[in-house]
Amino acid sequence: MSFTKQDIYKALETITAPGEGKSLIENNNVTNVVTFGDEVIVDVTISNPTLQAKKKIESEISKAIKTAVGEKIEVKINVKVEKPESKETPNQIKGKAIPNIKNIIAIASGKGGVGKSTITSNVAISLAKMGFSVGVLDADVYGPSQHIMFDVEKARPLSVKVDGRSKMQPVENYGVKLLSLGFFTNPDEAVIWRGPMASKALNQLIFDGNWGELDFLLIDLPPGTGDVHLSIVQALPINGAVVVSTPQNIALADAKKGVAMFQQKSINVPVLGIIENMAYFTPEELPNNKYYIFGKDGAKNLAIDIKTKFLGEIPLVQSIRESGDVGHPVALQEGTVLEKSFTDITKEIVSELLKRNSNLPPTEVVRITTMSGCSSVKK
């Protein structure tokens, strides 16, 4: 059988390294190829340390060579795991951009249970209704919920070929593209992963997802300031962060830490503002009354104290919870007070993002090119 090294390299161009988003050849993962008769030896280096990743690469390389070059070729593969060198410098936006994604916004909270995922889903839908192309990455590894809120709990992302490589096709509903670990885990079992494994899983969702062209990618972060947060800001150039809190002092204390994390010199992600969720309760039978169950103006005062924008408040309303539970967020309810509240907050986020983008060097950001539906936002 006659073949050359170039035949082998061409076959390997169709394989993507786990979590890298580029082919083995483009990413320089293949360090050497030796051919001798009907035998091929491939030396490959990957950054994913898991046994699953190593076995997957070995299987894909062998299959690609046998399919494209010759079925009778004996393929030997030497896989080496090597941590990539860090070339990051302080005060620099980190990570590699995802092609065709213009703006990435992280939605965070210092404390769990403040409604961060609810805010994320409704802001995403509000952006989509304004005419933007929107995606949501559910990065809450241990408690994913976006697949429930978008009523796609039983859906599964399909594998598609893009430029000869396998990609995950996000699930789409309400005009929003979605990828979540909730699609891949058993709802009755706990996800018991250490930080590195969770980070690698997220990288695969980010870089192996076929997101297409997006004006906005919203990242629903887990509560706190842990491994997942650091992995995200190191993997992606985040344009800005939005912090969600309730008005009570305990939640505000944690929200302040969340803001401080993004403002660390080594992270340096601009905080676009704070949203106050469950701000007050108004009984249906007393529409003019407001009861401040968790305190009054807590997040608004925090925004003033830390010199960031107060983006708006969302009341404590039963229908918001019910709509999220049945997978039909309230931002879909045309002509309602709650739809207007989320629309106003979304416009404030876009407005702050425009200001943020205009104050950074052009090489570090991709500016918004359409403002469909955002006439109230000044350019």
Image (tube, rainbow, N blue to C red):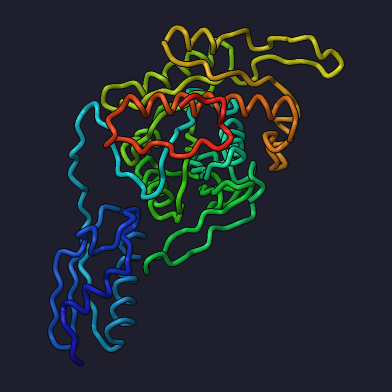
For the C terminus, the image quarter is top left
Residue 233 lies in quadrant: top left
Relative to 113, 231 lies left or right? left
Can residue 324 be seen? no
Q: Residue at x 37, y 34 (%)?
A: 238
**Residue at the right extreme of this rendering:** 285
Residue 90 lies in quadrant: top left
Q: Residue at x 40, y 49 (%)?
A: 100
Relative to 343, 214 lies left or right? left
> Is 108 situated above or below 87?
above
Q: Residue at x 84, y 12 (%)?
A: 286
Q: 89 or 174: which is nearer to us?
A: 174
For the N terminus, the image quarter is bottom left
Q: Residue at x 43, y 22 (%)?
A: 258
Numbered circles on residues, count: 0
User: Residue 69: image x %, image y %?
Assistant: 27, 83
Residue 326 lies in quadrant: top right
Relative to 158, 101 lies left or right? left
> Is 217 situated above or below 78?
above
> Is 287 situated above or below 164?
above
Can residue 132 be seen? yes
User: Residue 43: image x %, image y %?
Assistant: 18, 67
User: Residue 365: image x %, image y %?
Assistant: 33, 36
User: Residue 350: image x %, image y %?
Assistant: 49, 29
Relative to 369, 157 lies left or right? right
> Is 72 situated above or below 216?
below
Q: 333 or 85: which is nearer to us?
A: 333
